Image (cartoon, rainbow, N blue to C red):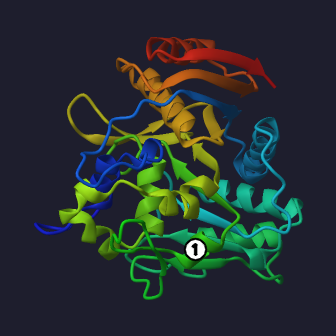
Amino acid sequence: MQNIKENGLSRRSFLKTTGLGVGILAASAPSMALHNTVHTQKGAVATGTLKNAGLLEHAQVYEQYATLANALELPNMNNSKVLIVLGAVDSLPYPHSVDNKLLFASLKHLAMQGVQANDITIAYSASHNLETSSAFFHAAQQAFGAKNNLPNYINTRDLKEWYSLNLNNALPTINVLPQAAAADHILYLGQLTDDTGLLTTPQYVIANVLLEDRSVSQYADHLDNLIELQAVFDAVYAKVSLIANNTTRFIAESSTGKRETIQVHPGILNMSNSMTSQRIFSQSYFNALMNKPTKRASIASELTWLQHGKTRDPLTVQTIESALAKSGVELKTIQI
């Protein structure tokens, strides 16, 4: 995440300071400092095992994606404007970039619902625009057919035209991707960790893609007055209908401090309709795999874990359940 020096503010710092990642701040007098809020979280996470199926991997990921989406009772998005946010796009393949099979599964699932490619936008932030020969374009061709219309791809890194959100109390405007303001549903596709080995936080990545850095940096000297972000929430975060991670591989830091790619056999496709629930599960899953202690999730009280398929290593499931329990989450497990 790029940091704005001295008179600026990075998106990560902005979101951490305002608490946008865990909810909307209540309005209060401009002179008052920001309040610490505690939220009671009741959410659901659906997971399915993924095994190396060779040439059938695309079909396997789609089958799991559809099964888990149905288990979460996601709304039918036909006749809707859908924005897909790619968590990371890099010249290196997955896990440095989002798994193109996950994008394929998401697009095919939308196509099977009757969503037209013209109503889908795929947003990402990268130093270079995607080539039409990239795996991400190929994923769309597989989902909709090479001769049909394809979704619109947008790199927001150097975007010139933004949609301005007017906030209360005469605060400076915040600019958001126009397709985000117009979208009925936003889907986030990511991976368990970033390329430094840290657990990915979807709301930070979504902000990195959908909010203009320059407009956010205007709030460096106005933090005490940032008390009402309802407009940003309505335009972006309230529309996030799905968060999905493919964790068949992830990047982690070894005991010697070296970053390395960890293979998970079988892997897990985990999805949720709640960013908080997704973060709680991902943190516990990651800690369980890396044999790290789990911190208490004080903002969570109940999490339903919908499981599909059996892992070849039942101890992994037991370890994850134990990690979730130690985090303070009341876990309800359902086999689907």
Viewer-side residue, 322 vs 83: 83
Viewer-side residue, 230 vs 131: 230
Q: Quadrant of the C terminus?
A: top right
Q: Residue furthest front?
A: 29
Residue name at image x 73 percent, y 55 percent: 105
Residue name at image x 40 percent, y 77 percent: 157
**Picture coordinates of residue 2 (x, y %)?**
26, 64
Horizontal arrangement in the rendering, residue 247 relative to residue 299 (left or right): right
Q: Quadrant of the N terminus?
A: bottom left
Q: Can I make out residue 93 in this image?
A: no
**Picture coordinates of residue 255 (x, y %)?**
24, 28
Compared to 215, does 327 lie above or below? above
Residue name at image x 55 percent, y 55 percent: 237
How many labels were placed on the picture? 1
Compared to 155, does 111 lie above or below? above
Horizontal arrangement in the rendering, residue 118 relative to residue 188 (left or right): right
Viewer-side residue, 14 vs 308: 14
Q: Can I make out residue 266 in this image?
A: yes
Q: Secondary structure at mark 1?
A: loop
Horizontal arrangement in the rendering, residue 26 relative to residue 313 (left or right): left
Which residue is under mark 1? 134
Within the image, what quadrant is residue 9 found in? bottom left
Q: Residue furthest left?
A: 6
**Picture coordinates of residue 113 (x, y %)?**
88, 59
Within the image, what quadrant is residue 315 found in? top right
**Picture coordinates of residue 131 (x, y %)?**
54, 81
Residue name at image x 51 percent, y 25 percent: 300
Viewer-side residue, 115 vs 267: 115
The kind of residue tagged 1 is Ser
Compared to 310, does 98 lie above or below? below
Q: Residues within 10 Å of mark 1 (few under 14, many from 20)?
A: few
